Amino acid sequence: MERSEVYNQLNEIFQDVFDNEEITVDDSTTAEDVEGWDSNMHITLIAEVEDSFDIHFEMRDVAKMHNVGEMVDKIIELIQQN
């Protein structure tokens, strides 16, 4: 899966989870950039990403993600492992 395809899918997930059609994420997007992205919403977001891409993040990997770019890197890595 190409990085652009991951971003297309992630943008839809973010828009659905945060109920905001205007959200567009990129490599540098962090929780501080998205209104309502708190620890509770982070759990929901991770679950939606896992379901959508049919992957599973290890908790240590989630803890290491500091921005959406790092999330995309991990998504691509997990997809390639399957």
Image (cartoon, helix red, strand yellow):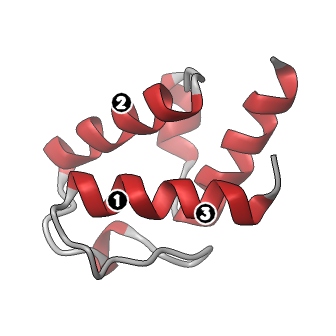
Point out the tag, 1 or 3, that comes first from the N-terminus: 3
Question: Is disc 1 surrounded by few (<14), some (14 to 19) or many (20+) residues within 10 Å?
Answer: many
- Residue 9 sits in which quadrant? bottom right
Q: Is residue 42 left or right of residue 3?
A: left
Tag 1 secondary structure: helix
Question: Is disc 3 surrounded by few (<14), some (14 to 19) or many (20+) residues within 10 Å?
Answer: some
Q: Is residue 55 left or right of residue 63?
A: right
The CA distance from mark 1 to mark 3 is: 10 Å
Q: Residue 28 at what x, y percent from top left?
A: 56, 78
The CA distance from mark 2 to mark 1 is: 12 Å
Quadrant into which the C terminus falls: top right
Residue located beneath label 1 in the image: 14
The reply to whether callout 1 and callout 3 are in contact (CB within 8 Å) is no
- Residue 53 sits in which quadrant? top right
Tag 2 secondary structure: helix
- Residue 37 sits in which quadrant? bottom left
Residue at figure coordinates x 54%, y 63% from the top left: 68
Residue located beneath label 3 in the image: 7
Disc number lying in front (3 or 2): 3
